[in-house]
Image (tube, rainbow, N blue to C red):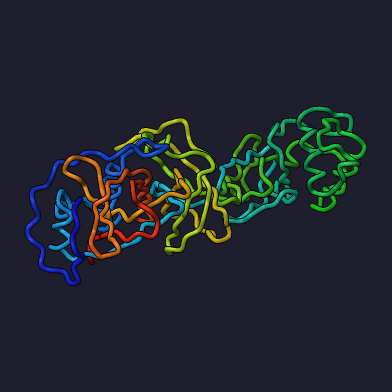
Amino acid sequence: MATTEIPTEGAQSAPPPEEPERRPGTRRRHRGRTAAVVVALVAAGGAGAIFANPFDSARSQDPAASSQDTATNTAKVTKGTLSSRTQQNGTLGYAGSYDVVNKASGTVTRVPAVGQVIRQGKPLYWVDGEPVILLKGARTPVYRALERGDEGEDVKQLNAALVELGYATDEQIDPDSDYFSRQTRWALKKLQDDVGVEETGKLSLGQALFLPVDEIRVTSVDAVIGGSAAPGKPIIQGSSTGRQVTVELNASQQSDVKVGDKVTITMPDDTSTPGVVSSVGKVAKQGENKTTIDVTIKPTKPKVTGRLDKAPVQVAIVSDTVKDVLSVPVDALLALAGGGYAVEVVKADRTTELIPVETRLFDGSAGRVEVSGDRLRAGQDVVVPGS
């Protein structure tokens, strides 16, 4: 077992010996990757000098000798939680995309502005001076006029919308009922009064449109004031007001990410906010240089993300986590000539002892790696390269 004195001052470094053969470390838990491979990948991604080639030849084969030839510091062996992260580029914007298709006949007399947010129960646009109302519903598109005595899925979503808007209680109208009752007619008349149209208690074709959102954010307007509002013609395009980050993930990394994984979103102004993976695509898209899948992320604090649309962001996806494990800085690892890794532990008498370790999960953000080894415990000092 090699022992050396910890130098008090760094001496000039001797030329490094010939690069030793490097073998992969032990397989890490859960993902089955070696620490060496993960470090190499992070270095290739430009994660920073601390991760670039931590196993340089000056600290290989004979670490005891190198500690006397190069400046060194010490760091602690700690016990705690580590997380493996996948760094990706993402785009911040709004969730969903919806086409508003007109069902009324006449002339377009008013349209909303791009960026305007329209809530359920409010007019989307106007035809012949009459408002077309937004109602929430995803089951059936508008295809007929509705009146008392009608039945069907379209009536069910009308009943649900009237209850959600507060024009009736769920005791007065069952939101799951597909029957246009007297109570439905009464509640619809109240809605018509609020938006300023004739209180007929009947929903004429084109008077309302159903979309699967509580409110829509207008992204473009296809209609022109004074133009024809022909049935089946697109009038507006919009999105929800929910914030979302989209990542085009390399298809080979699909198994590394799952719904529910926690992420850190770094905004264009370098502030960070948490999020969670909400969906992982299953259909690959072929790009110019790679095949990707779409991963969508929901910010945990959407208000912090502001109102930027199609803004570039950085996303760190937590793909694996371990708790109550020992870890050391990545650059404390020494590549052994015979294969595997070791750390140089400082003993009470200020000499050092080389302890072989097994490497597991790598935490790129913290710059630490999970290790285990005989006689290794939390609180020990290990030798790391000096700055």
Q: Quadrant of the C terminus?
A: bottom left
**Closer to the camera in the image, 358 or 241:** 358
Q: Residue at x 17, y 50 (%)?
A: 60
Displayed quadrant of residue 143 = top right
Residue 365 coordinates in the image, percent (x, y): 38, 55
Decide if residue 11 is on the left or right side of residue 48: left
Can residue 374 be seen in the rendering of this structure?
Answer: yes
Q: How many marks?
A: 0
Decide if residue 214 is on the left or right side of residue 253: right
Displayed quadrant of residue 349 = bottom left
Decide if residue 384 is on the left or right side of residue 299: left
Question: Looking at this rendering, what residue extends furthest in the bottom direction?
Answer: 9
Question: Looking at this rendering, what residue extends furthest in the right direction?
Answer: 182
Can residue 185 be seen in the rendering of this structure?
Answer: no
Judge whether 108 appears above or below 268 on screen.
Answer: above
Judge whether 287 appears above or below 193 on screen.
Answer: above
Displayed quadrant of residue 304 = bottom right
**Closer to the camera in the image, 379 or 324:** 379
Residue 323 coordinates in the image, percent (x, y): 48, 48
Judge whether 9 appears above or below 279 on screen.
Answer: below
**Closer to the camera in the image, 64 or 221:** 64
**Closer to the camera in the image, 123 or 164:** 164
Q: Residue at x 33, y 46 (%)?
A: 373
Residue 94 coordinates in the image, percent (x, y): 54, 50
Q: Residue at x 45, y 47 (%)?
A: 318
